[in-house]
Structure formats: C-alpha cells, structure tokens
C-alpha cells in the first residue's frame, strides 16, 4: 500500500470524507456522549434517570445503525479501492461488526444493571457522570475491535484502560475500591508502557506503524530474531493485560473484588472481548508466515499454558466468589489464547464464538454474585450454604452458568471449548508444542471441574439457617433469564450455524 | 550530527530506569514517575527512529499522541493516588493490602 503522502490533497480530502460514512456507529456514540454531558447539566437534578435512559438510547441507536449497515461494508472509493477508512487506521469489516454488536449487548446490560444496583445508586446519588465514563469505555472497545494501525490500537486500548481506572475508583468512600483502582492503574500503566516501547521498536525496525503493510512483515521477518522476539513480547504485554493473561493478570482478582459489581461484571466480559478482537487482528496481520508466526505461536502458547494452570490452581483456593470468577477468567483467557494461536479462520471463529457464550455466562454469574452480596452482605462461598431454598431461580441459573464455564454438555460452554480444542487439533499436525498445549488444556478442564461445581454443591446440599426467600428485583430476573437462554440454546442447536456465520464474516478479514 | 544510535541507547537506559523504579520502589508516586520514564523512552525512540525514515512524520505524530496520552493517564493516576491517601493515610504499596488471597 502506498504511503499516505503520495496522494494529492484533493484525493486525501475525498478519502477522509468517504471514511466518515463508515464511522457512523462510532460518531453516534461520540455525539451521544456529548449530549449526555448536556443532559446531565440541564435535567440531571430534576430527572435523575434521564442520563442512563439517554445512554441506553444512544447505544441502541448505534447498534441499530450497525445492523442496518450490515457486515459487508468494504471501503469503496472508486479512485482508491485499496485504502481503508482514515488511511488504513480502522477496518469496519465483518469481524469488528460482530464484536461491536457484542459490545452493544454488553453496554445495554451494564447500563441496565448499574441503574438498578442499590450499592451503585447510593454512590452515584443518581448522578449521570458514571454513565458518561461507561460510554467512553464502550467507544474505546468499538475502536479496539476496528483498529489496524499500531498507534490506533494503543490509543483505543488506553481509552478503555483510563475509563476503567475511573470506573473502578467510582465508589470513592470504599477502601476496597480505592485500593483496587490503584493496583489496576499501576499494572495497567506499567504494561502499557511496555507495549508502547515495543511498538516504538517495531516502528524503528520496519519504518511503519501499519502491521498490514508488506514492508512491515518483510522487514520484521528479516530482522534479528532476538530483537523481534523481545519486542513482540513487549507488545503482547499490553494485550495480555487487557485479556488478563499471565504475566499481567495480577490486577484481575483485586479489581473484580473491589470494584462495584456492575462495573466488575462489565470488565470481566467487555474489555476481554475487545482485547481478543484486537489481538486476533494483530496476530493475523503480523504472523502471516515464516519466523514471525513461529515467534507468536511460541509466546502465545507459553502465555496460554501458564494462564490456564495458574488461574485454575489459584481459583481452587478462593473463598470469595468474585475472586474465584477472576481466577477462572484468567484460566479462560488461556483457553481463548489457544484458539488465537491456531492462525486459522476456524480458530479465530471459535474464539469469537467462545467469547459470545463467555459474555452471557460470566456476566450472569457476576450478577448472581452481586445480588447475593447486596442481600447478605457477604461474598464468601461459605455464605451460600443451603441458600437453594431461599433463591430457587438464582440457584438454577448459576448452576447452569457454572456448568457451562466448566465446559460440560449440554451448554454453550461445552461447544465453545470443543471448537477451540478442535481448532488446535486441526493445526497440531506434527507439532509437539501444540499437542502439549492441547493435553494441558484438557487436563486443566478437569481441574476446573472441582471449583466450579463446588458452588452449586454448597448451594444445594448444605444445611442452612436461612429460611426466608430473598427478594429479587424483576429486572434482574429478566436479565438473568435472557443471559441463560443463549448459554442453553447454543449448547443444543444453532451453534454450527453461528460458527459458520462468523467464518463467513472472517473472509473479508 | 549526533548519530541515531545514541538516542536509542539513552532510550534503553530511560526505559530500564523506569521499569526498575516501578518494580523496586514501594512508593506509588515514584512508581508513577517510573511509568512516565517508560513512556518517554518510547517517545524518544519514535522521534529518533523517525529520523532514519524518508518520511519522519509518522513517528513524530506517534510521539505527540503518546505525550497527550501520558498527561491524561497521569491526571487520572494522581487522582487515584490522592483518593488512596485519603483512605489509607499512606501511599506505600506494601501497606495497602486489604485485597489479597486468603
């Protein structure tokens, strides 16, 4: 692709104007964010619900525009068909389309649960600024799934990160929240420092920030393997932090425990999905062939195996439900990395499918943990003893989510794991490294059985003094059932259609 | 003219200094300074490597963006540190340990 300065100015302007048409969902989010600032100033005091309502409308509008635009949205400027929007900065392809729809769903869930959460309402006092930060984060996630230029990737990642530091610290009066935000910030800024330093070296080696350009892969492949390996490791540090993979996972348990629960639920699914979308694009563009791909497979494979093992072993010992979910999330990031390092359309599609199911089950499980904590004041697994009678719906649904997270049939989690393992097996061929990874992943699934199923066992089979029924807000009931449906349905039928559909989306990748 | 490699070496030195500060120092403010050093090492690299290219603007633009981003990051970071200081009366990372595995 020719460098940008080779175009005459008039062509550049046409290209930029044409790019805007592909950027409407993001523009709607940005305009909505600004409108929400105004709404907060004008109606914030009189109608406290106006800002979240406006946020919901904006997210729905941007999702609606995505649906209308459709996923076949190549950049068509008749004069320069080879240039992507904003001179190759973003790619509004089918792959990012799918992820942006996932983010719309996450955004709706987060705004809804935040509005109905008692703890959060006490803190925000009905103020709307909280929702502004959620919207900013959502915009960052959109950009992460679309970013193609290394600088764009970094900026999108930082937009998400900085918003999440603010959201974690949002309960200012809470000691836990303050500590969680500090740890999140230190680890986040540290790993992003590694990432940008790595990017600066990649720029130095290749002379371009566009990983999709021919000279990028060619020069990086020809460079000293030691330097390119170390610098790729540095760049992957930023990704590892976002998807909470070892060795940048330390923040996850603290943030999941200390942040307000709608925020923690948002973090456990949204940025993780965005991180994987960006990681898939990065490895797809960089690791097309030869030594670079070997480097990436080695680095991602090591990250995957350590994340799985460490996450599962640490989750075994947790007393707090939220910390357990955090460590399980680290282990799940390990499984997902396996799908990424396959470097095949099927592997990438299985990751996208896994993230879809993962969104439903983890968000649901976090809701359960949050609701229980709001009602009983405790977060430990022991405090759930014999609560099955007090909350039948929650017991049934959380059992479903946990069975799905373990990867047992007939749930979506089973199918998702199966697809990932199949993708690895297909690519393993005669590579002992990939086969080892596969065996490790299967062994890890067995280990995870123990701590996932401990929760329903404690819920159902222990004696308790708790006899009264817990009250459950109607909104939470609806949301939990809505989240449970895809987990169950995708485990029985329709999963092959969805994976095929994602593979079709990936053809324009 | 100063050769480009000198800038790169200073960059490496700055980066290592930053990493060292974050890892060894328990004071949060020093850790923040370390993070700034890491970002500035990247900035120096961007501009220095840009000099080697036919078209240096890409690297210079990247450095500008990173400078702005570092400012935003440190603004949020200092607010968080202040909030922590109000709750704990300390900014020592070792003494802030309510959240940990049992």
Image (cartoon, coloured by chain):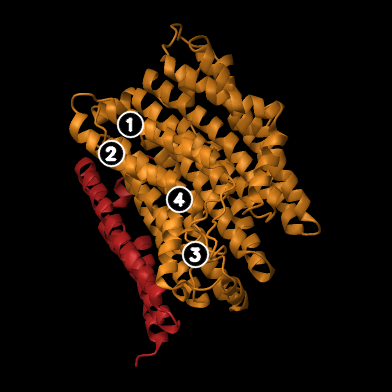
Chain colours: A orange, B red
Q: Which residue is mark 4?
A: A21
Report the quarter where the C terminus of chain A lies. Answer: bottom right
N-terminal label among 1 and 2: 2
N-terminal label among 2 and 4: 4
Q: Which-is-in-front pick, marks 1 and 3?
A: 1
Res A35 label? 2
- Measured in 3D between alpha carbons, the distance from the residue under mark 2 to the one under mark 4, in whole angstroms, is 21 Å
Please report, as a chain letter, where disc 1 is located: A
**Number of other residues with Cα within 10 Å of mark 4, as a class: few under 14, some 14 to 19, many 20 or more:** few
Does residue A304 appear left or right of residue A245 in this picture? right
Q: Which-is-in-front pick, marks 3 and 2?
A: 2
Q: Which residue is mark 3?
A: A234
- Measured in 3D between alpha carbons, the distance from the residue under mark 3 to the one under mark 4, in whole angstroms, is 35 Å
**Number of other residues with Cα within 10 Å of mark 2, as a class: few under 14, some 14 to 19, many 20 or more:** some
N-terminal label among 1 and 4: 4
* Proximity of marks 1 and 2: CB atoms separated by less than 8 Å: yes
Residue A455, percent from left and from top: 55, 24
Residue B67, percent from left and from top: 30, 65
Q: Which-is-in-front pick, marks 2 and 4?
A: 4
- Measured in 3D between alpha carbons, the distance from the residue under mark 3 to the one under mark 2, in whole angstroms, is 38 Å
Please report, as a chain letter, where disc 2 is located: A
């Amino acid at each position: 692709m020719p460098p940008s300065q080779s175009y005459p100015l008039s062509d550049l302007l046409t290209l930029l104007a044409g790019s805007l048409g592909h950027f409407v969902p993001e523009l709607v989010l940005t305009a909505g964010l600004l409108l929400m600032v105004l709404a907060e100033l004008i109606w914030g005091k009189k109608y406290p619900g106006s800002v979240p309502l406006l946020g919901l409308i904006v997210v729905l509008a941007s999702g609606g525009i995505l649906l209308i635009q459709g996923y076949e949205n190549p950049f068509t400027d008749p004069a320069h068909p080879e240039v992507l929007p904003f001179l190759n900065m973003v790619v509004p392809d089918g792959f990012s389309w799918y992820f942006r729809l996932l983010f719309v769903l996450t955004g709706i869930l987060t705004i809804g649960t935040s509005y109905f959460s008692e703890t959060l309402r006490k803190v925000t006092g009905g103020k709307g600024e909280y929702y502004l930060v959620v919207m900013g984060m959502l915009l960052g996630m959109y950009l992460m799934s679309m970013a193609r230029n290394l600088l764009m990737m970094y900026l999108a990642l930082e937009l998400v990160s900085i918003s999440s530091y603010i959201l974690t610290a949002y309960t200012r009066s809470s000691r836990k929240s303050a500590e969680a935000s500090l740890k999140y910030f230190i680890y986040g800024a540290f790993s992003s420092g590694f990432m940008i330093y790595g990017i600066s070296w990649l720029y130095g080696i290749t002379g371009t920030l566009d990983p999709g350009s021919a000279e990028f892969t060619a020069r990086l492949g020809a460079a000293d393997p030691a330097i390119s390996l170390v610098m790729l490791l540095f760049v992957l540090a930023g990704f590892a932090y976002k998807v909470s993979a070892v060795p940048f996972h330390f923040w996850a348990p603290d943030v999941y425990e200390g942040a307000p629960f709608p925020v923690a639920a948002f973090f456990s699914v949204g940025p993780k999905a965005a991180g994987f979308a960006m990681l898939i694009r990065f490895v797809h563009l960089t690791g097309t062939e030869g030594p670079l791909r070997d480097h990436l497979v080695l680095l991602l494979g090591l990250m995957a195996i350590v994340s799985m093992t460490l996450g599962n072993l640490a989750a075994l010992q947790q007393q707090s439900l939220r910390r357990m979910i955090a460590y399980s999330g680290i282990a799940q990031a390990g499984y997902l990395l396996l799908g990424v390092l396959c470097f095949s359309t099927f592997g990438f599609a299985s990751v996208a499918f896994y993230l879809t199911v993962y969104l439903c089950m983890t968000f649901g499980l976090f809701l359960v943990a949050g609701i229980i904590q709001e009602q009983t004041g405790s977060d430990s697994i022991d405090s759930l003893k014999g609560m099955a009678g007090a909350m039948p719906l929650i017991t049934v649904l959380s059992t479903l989510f946990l069975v799905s997270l373990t990867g047992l049939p007939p749930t979506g989690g089973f199918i998702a794991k199966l697809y990932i393992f199949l993708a690895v097996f297909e690519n393993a061929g005669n590579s002992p490294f990939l086969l080892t990874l596969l065996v490790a992943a299967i062994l890890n699934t067995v280990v995870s059985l123990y701590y996932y199923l401990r929760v329903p066992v404690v819920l159902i089979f222990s004696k308790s003094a708790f006899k009264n029924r817990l009250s459950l807000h109607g909104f939470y009931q609806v949301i939990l059932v809505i989240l449970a449906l895809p987990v169950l349905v995708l485990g029985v039928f329709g999963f092959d259609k969805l994976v095929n559909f994602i593979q079709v989306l990936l053809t324009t990748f | 003219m100063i050769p480009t490699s000198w800038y790169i070496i200073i960059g490496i030195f700055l980066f290592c200094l930053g990493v060292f500060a974050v890892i060894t120092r328990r004071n949060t403010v020093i850790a923040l300074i370390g993070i700034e050093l890491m970002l500035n090492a990247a900035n120096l690299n961007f501009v220095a490597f840009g000099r080697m290219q036919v078209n240096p603007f890409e690297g210079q633009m990247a450095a500008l963006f990173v400078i702005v981003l570092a400012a935003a990051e440190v603004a949020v970071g200092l607010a968080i540190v202040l909030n922590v200081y109000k709750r704990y009366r300390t900014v020592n990372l070792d003494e802030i340990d309510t959240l940990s595995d049992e």
